[in-house]
Amino acid sequence: MTEIDATQFMTDIFGMWTEPDVDARRAVIQSRFAEGVHFHDPDGESVGHAGLEAFSDSLQSRFPGARFTLAGVPRTQ
């Protein structure tokens, strides 16, 4: 199994949710998730890369200019 840098992974994921550049967002989605990804959220379920892009679009429309940051170093097991 490939070792993942947890801090970089979470930074990429947080940035993906609010990235306004569609190509940059798509690059993160494609590099971090399999096409068959299922993402569950209180707002519902997003399926596949297109579903993650749609969810990101919805976050941007609801929370324009929002940015996520890590509160600390991610814990892994």
Image (cartoon, rainbow, N blue to C red):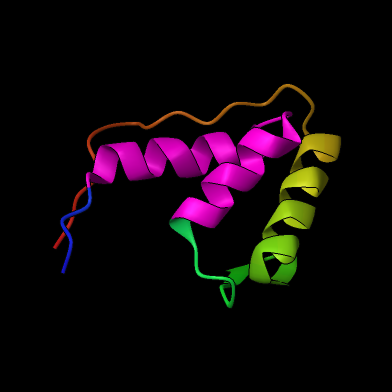
Whether 61 is drawn above or below 32: the answer is above
Whether 63 is drawn above or below 28: the answer is above
Question: Which quarter of the figure has residue 71?
Answer: top left
Quadrant where the C terminus lies? bottom left
Asked if the stretch drawn in magenta spans residue 12, the answer is yes
Magenta-colored segment: predominant secondary structure: helix
Asked if the stretch drawn in magenta spans residue 20, the answer is yes
Counting from the top left corner in percent of width and height, residue 21 is at 72, 29
Quadrant where the N terminus lies? bottom left
Question: Which quarter of the figure has residue 48?
Answer: bottom right
Q: Residue furthest right?
A: 61
The residue lying at 67 percent from left, 26 percent from top is: 66
Q: Which contiguous range is marked in magenta?
A: 5-31
From the viewer's perspective, tell me whether residue 7 is left or right of residue 48. Answer: left
Counting from the top left corner in percent of width and height, residue 61 is at 86, 37
The residue lying at 45 percent from left, 28 percent from top is: 69
Counting from the top left corner in percent of width and height, residue 20 is at 73, 29
From the viewer's perspective, tell me whether residue 60 is left or right of residue 38. Answer: right
The residue lying at 45 percent from left, 39 percent from top is: 12
